[in-house]
Image: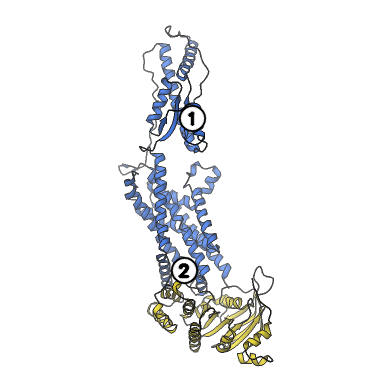
Chain colours: A yellow, B blue
Amino acid sequence: MSNFIIEIKNLYKKYKNSEDFSVNDISLNIDKNEIYGILGPNGAGKTTLISMLSGLIKPTSGSFTINGLSPKKDSSKIKQIIGVVPQEYALYPTLTAKENLLFFGSLYGLKHKNLHKEIDEALELMGLTKFANKKVDQFSGGMKRRCNLIAGTLHNPKVLFLDEPTVGVDVQSKKAIIDYLLDLNKKGTCIIYTSHHLSEAEEFCTKIAIIDHGKIHATGTPQELVERVANAENLEDVFISLTGKELRDVV
Amino acid sequence: MLYKLWRSFIKEIQLLKRDSGGIVIIFLMPLLLIITITLIQDSTFKNLEGSKIPIIFIDNDKSEVSKVIKKELETSKTFELVTDYNEKSAEKAVFTGDYQMAIVIPENLTKDLNSNIDSKVQTVVSSFGLEPDSTVTKAVASKAKDIHLYFDPATNAGFKNSVMNAINKMVFEIENKKIYKAFQEQLGTTEDLENKSLITFKEITPIKGKEELMPNSVQHNVPAWALFAIFFIVVPLSINLVKEKSQGTSVRVRVSPTPYYIHILGKTFTYLIICIIQFLLMVAVGIWLFPLMDLPQFDVSGKMLHLLIVTLFAGLAAIGFGVLIGTVSDTQEQSAPFGATSVVVLAAVGGIWVPVFLMPEFMQKIAQFSPMNWGLNAYYDIILRNSGISEIAKELIFLFLFYIAMVTISLLYERKQNAV
């Protein structure tokens, strides 16, 4: 059996009213236990790629498998082993953190004591135990982000898709989130992660793909990427070198 | 699956519990609606003391006919006659909306009516070769007189027609009476020819046991407006679904292994409970509050279980419609006005405002496809026609199929929009 948990072959996505492909012939293999960063400027196709892999939108053409399962045949099985943490706070603002987590955990078949145990442990790790019974709309941005992350990981997924999980949070929350993700990865979760924080990605990711205009421009470990580009001192230099300095305003 | 459904149901209940303003609106507005509409509609059926309509009455005849008309109007308990106007000032007062109508009895109406009738009767009697009573003077026919009716241009057409019919009937009876009297005089007979109706009407109402079921405005209004209120569940339910899209929580549901229909079933159970509570509150108002407001009591004796079954199926139909609107709408600005307007349209088509039999033929055919019409018929069958479940099975099946159709379309739409 292949060691790749995700295998993507010639994946394309073109939205109805768009002239260009948002994802344009992407082929990629991701190892188990990897923390894989997908980096690119605004409109590069990062969210579209993650949305296709997590089953939210349909590819125009191409195929992929997750843990050897095809979404066309085994959509339900794939959904059981993946976790998704969207960019927005996908939580019910008028419910408490615990009520939200009880509902989202139950969607993955977690029940009773087991569900409560998972929730309590995750809240503890994220420093949210004393706010468990507070309504989410009273939370700060960082608390919401942490709760959002717990909601997507309660069922200990084999693959976790994260769309900019640390955007708009303070340093403390960011550290808590990264530590939590590293812990998950140690326990065997493969993490696919998009971000604009290049220094964070450089530290956090074991492998990175830089994409732009829907195409992959480079893949490798952060160190490999830095070494590959002349005069590059860090990932930001690599990024600018590959994607240019032109502003990327997307409508 | 049952546990997932249970948690989904609990989540919906928790969301509702946190929205106390929304709860008040969901339960109080239907009560306000049913009380207001019943009070208004009841006054059109029942002539309550103190709710008489003031109209202008100008008597230029001041004789027998005008006195009879005046007496009839006064005893009808519907009108309060205002007499201190002349025709010109009355016209102005009515056309500016100060009064709903004015009745102007022309000068010499009695005298001219008498001479017209006498002249015609004399002609008839002569044509039979009979000698008219010699003591009766030869009558000369005069021109027909007009009773002038002025209506406020804003007056409801139904009210206008019923008043005109009532006056027409009064005049017809006076004329008849006078014709009989004229024959009596011409023929010199003493036999009582007074025009008592030869055909009368007797309304036969449904009988339950030994009790006669007498429909009243409350028996009509409570089920009709309860149904209307139940269908308004479409608005909060569609907003609930749209909110989940804008909050991003629907994304979590879509990426989870739980089928979307479980999510919809959770909402269905929650909102079905709301529908039942709404109905029970409206029934409670009909039973206990209406009598205190001088309205007839809503009679549900022996019918409550049947009514609850209809409510359950009507609620399902309303929920299905709400799910569809919430699924296809992208924003609350789309779902709320569309939901509210479409419920009003469904109510109009379904016969809540105007009975279906009064609609044009084309609309009557459309009404057969309105879930509100099925629900209303089922309620009326139970409350007014004393039917059982077997007689309303067709309506219940239609309501259930409507729910299934709406939810199926929603699920297909959702899958088409989102699935891999």
Q: Is residue B252 visible?
A: yes
Callout 2, which amino acid? Ile
What label does residue B379 carry, if any? none
Q: Is residue A247 left or right of residue A123?
A: right
Assign a secondary structure to mark 1.
Answer: helix
Q: Are marks 1 and 2 in contact (CB under 8 Å)?
A: no
On the image, the x and y values in percent for residue B300 come to 34, 49
Up-down: is B256 above or below B68?
A: below
Q: Residues within 10 Å of mark 1 (few under 14, many from 20)?
A: many
Q: Nearer the viewer, residue B181 or B86?
A: B86
Q: Is residue B385 visible?
A: no
On the image, the x and y values in percent for residue B166 come to 44, 30
What residue do we see at 51% from left, 30% from top?
A: B91
Up-down: is B86 above or below A119?
A: above
Which residue lies most toward the top here? B134
On the image, the x and y values in percent for residue B388 come to 38, 50
Q: Is residue B413 left or right of residue B98?
A: right
On the image, the x and y values in percent for residue B79 come to 41, 33
- Which quadrant holds residue A241? bottom right
- Which quadrant holds residue A222? bottom right
Q: Nearer the viewer, residue B96 or A130?
A: B96
Say which chain tag 2 marks. B
- Number of marks in the rendered image: 2
Assign a secondary structure to mark 2.
Answer: helix
Callout 1, which amino acid? Ala
Up-down: is A60 above or below A178?
A: above
What residue do we see at 40% from left, 77% from top?
A: A132
Q: CA distance from mark 1 to mark 2?
A: 67 Å
Q: Residues within 10 Å of mark 2 (few under 14, many from 20)?
A: some
What label does residue B262 carry, if any? 2
What label does residue B90 carry, if any? 1
Q: Quadrant of the C terminus of chain B?
A: bottom right
